Amino acid sequence: MEFLSEYGLFLAKVVTIVVALLVVFGIIVANRAHHRDRQPGHIAVSRLNDRYDDMKETLLEAVMDDADYHHRRKQQEKDKKAEAKAQAKKRKAELKAEAKASKKKHNDAAGNGAHEVKVPEQAEADAEAGVETEGAQLVSADESGTRKRLFVVHFDGDIKASALTNLREEITAILQVAEPKDEVVVCLESPGGMVANYGLAASQLARVRSAGVHLTVVVDKVAASGGYMMACVADRILAAPFAMLGSIGVVAQLPNFHRLLQRNDVDFELFTAGEYKRTVTMFGENTPEGKEKFQSDLEEIHTLFQHFVSEYRPQLDVVKVATGEVWFGQRALDLALVDELKTSDEYLTSRARNADLYQVEYKERQNIAKKIGFAAQSGIEGAIARLFSRLAAWRHQAQ
């Protein structure tokens, strides 16, 4: 008995120490996680041209003979060197022409006592050596042979437009470097959601057009309601043949438990200041006046939605399409909801031949708790999706 008593006391001490250590460790981890949460995320950029080239080279290496493939690679290296040499020669000629123009300007201004930062002889020498002068930086993109740049972002929207947090950072980053000759491509997927959230998301895309940069939206699956509110801002809308677009309307629905509460002798008291502070509720009795006002609010939002679409797509017969209906690709093209039927893959790979494609993504810092939460959410969603898929297959077999 004495042994058991001593062992129990020892075990209690061990448990106490372990619990204390766990508490201290938990506090340290929580503090570090809280510190990380306050740190901003970062912008990640990847060049899609390299990705497409890697895919192409992998397949060619697999299907071509070794000798032919190595010969092709050697020829590619020669072509790259020749192209680089030609570009350098062209640039040198441009710099030399710029130096001569600067010298002429210096001579013309000499009589007026104008001051030049760089003497023309030095500028011409720099041109011979291939050094770029300040004035040469103003050479246009077409003259200097610079390829057009496409900045690609992805927006996968839910009812809250949660991807808006990343979108605004991505747009802000792009507009720091984008020029009028460039293009922003948004791969958009969204069935719509909250009015204010999607209104702000559409405003983020409007920033691109306000900056004078061409904006293209590509829809592979769906851009409905708030999703189409975003899409219509683009200079050009592309959609897959079976993508769903439209749903230019407004919807609101909620249950009312007033009669259920009455049957159970439960009173629900609602206090407001202002005639229309609360037009309809879930637990109180909804009056005809309140319902009428609520419907009026929906109609006003619908009108604003239509005006917004008309502003960016004047060629669209808004009265005809603002019925809340959804149309598939070809029908959407007929109604001018989109400009061309093409998938994002087809568009991006075709543009990669004559432009540099950069995928821009804002990545938030995630602590351990968030990572575990996202993993659990993905697991549950996957399990539910597999369950519904199996149920559908079982019903099909039963029939």
Image (cartoon, helix red, strand yellow):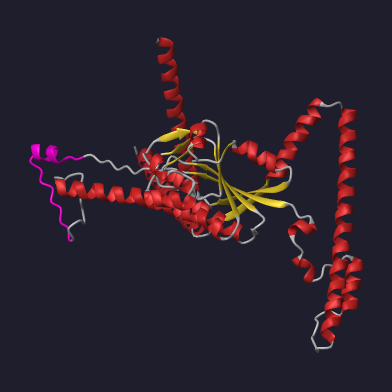
In reply to whether residue 257 is colored magenta, the answer given is yes
Is 363 on the left or on the right of 13, as rendered? right
Along the line of sight, the residue nearer the viewer: 26 or 88: 88
Residue 140: give x, y in percent of width and height: 74, 61
Residue 49: give x, y in percent of width and height: 71, 44
SS assignment for the magenta stretch, majority: loop
In reply to whether residue 217 is colored magenta, the answer given is no
Q: Is residue 69 visible?
A: yes
Q: How many marks?
A: 0
Residue 339: give x, y in percent of width and height: 55, 41
Residue 10: give x, y in percent of width and height: 41, 45
Is 240 on the left or on the right of 318, as rendered? right
| Residue 233 higher or lower than 323, as above or below | below
The quarter of the rendered structure image containing the C terminus is: top left
Q: Which residues are magenta?
A: 256-273
Q: Is residue 41 visible?
A: no
Residue 154 quadrant: top right
Is 254 on the left or on the right of 102, as rendered? left
Along the line of sight, the residue nearer the viewer: 281 or 136: 136
> What residue lies at 58% left-to-right and 55% top-to-bottom?
42
> What residue lies at 36% left-to-right and 43% top-to-bottom?
249
The quarter of the rendered structure image containing the N terminus is: top left
> What residue lies at 83% left-to-right and 75% top-to-bottom?
102
| Residue 281 higher or lower than 176, as above or below | above
Along the line of sight, the residue nearer the viewer: 213 or 366: 213
